[in-house]
Amino acid sequence: MEQLVLYEGRPTDCTGRLEKEVRTYDFLDKLGIHYWRTDHAWMKADTMEDCHVIDACLNAAVCKNLFLCNRQKTNFYLLMMPGNKPFKTKELSHQLGIARLSFASPEDMEQYLDCTPGSSSIMGLMNDPENHVQLLLDKDVKAGEFIGCHPCINTSSLKLYTKDIFEKFLPAVHHEPIFVELTGE
């Protein structure tokens, strides 16, 4: 297994990287957001188990990002929560006053966030200028100094200051989060 390396900022050469990944770096740089990056193309972070290895390199927890929708598929949600917390649909549905939440389709995720399953990320909100997706944040996410996420692909991961997400990124993408408290019970 290759060793993960933590780099400061964007890659010096973006040859071979997907346009949506490069667009993420461009956006963060434009906002003056400081970030660190690790590349792990040999280990796509499809599962939270994979993310534990990445967490250790980033020295920040990669959040669990779930793309959800209501039964009618008229409302879409990106839930960001600590990776170690279990997700209970009923608990979240109750807090939002929605009868039933389910996982949205990969096609909807790609349409609204320009992400595919396993790579959903708060960074995808920059691809949703019409605010089709409501950001839901577990309150515990805001408590940490750093947030770990993907740059719209799951072959690299980013470490950003939590305050930069709230003070720079979210205002720039015009997404106001709804805070939820998830216990996993």
Image (cartoon, rainbow, N blue to C red):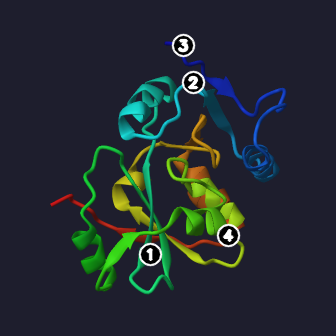
Query: Is 87 rendered above or below residue 134?
Result: above
Per the model, the C-alpha gap separating discs 2 and 3 is: 8 Å
Per the model, the C-alpha gap separating discs 2 and 4 is: 29 Å
Q: Are marks 2 and 3 in contact (CB under 8 Å)?
A: yes
Q: Amino acid at mark 1?
A: Cys
Question: What residue is disc 4 on?
Answer: 128
What number is the disc on residue 42?
A: 2
What number is the disc on residue 2?
A: 3
SS label for mark 3: loop
The residue at the point 84 percent across, 31 percent down is 15
- The answer to which of marks 3 and 1 sits earlier in the sequence is 3
Where residue 35 sits: x, y (%)?
Answer: 65, 38
Per the model, the C-alpha gap separating discs 2 and 1 is: 31 Å
Question: What residue is disc 1 on?
Answer: 69
Callout 2 environment at 10 Å: few (<14), some (14 to 19), or many (20+)? few
178 or 94: nearer the viewer: 94
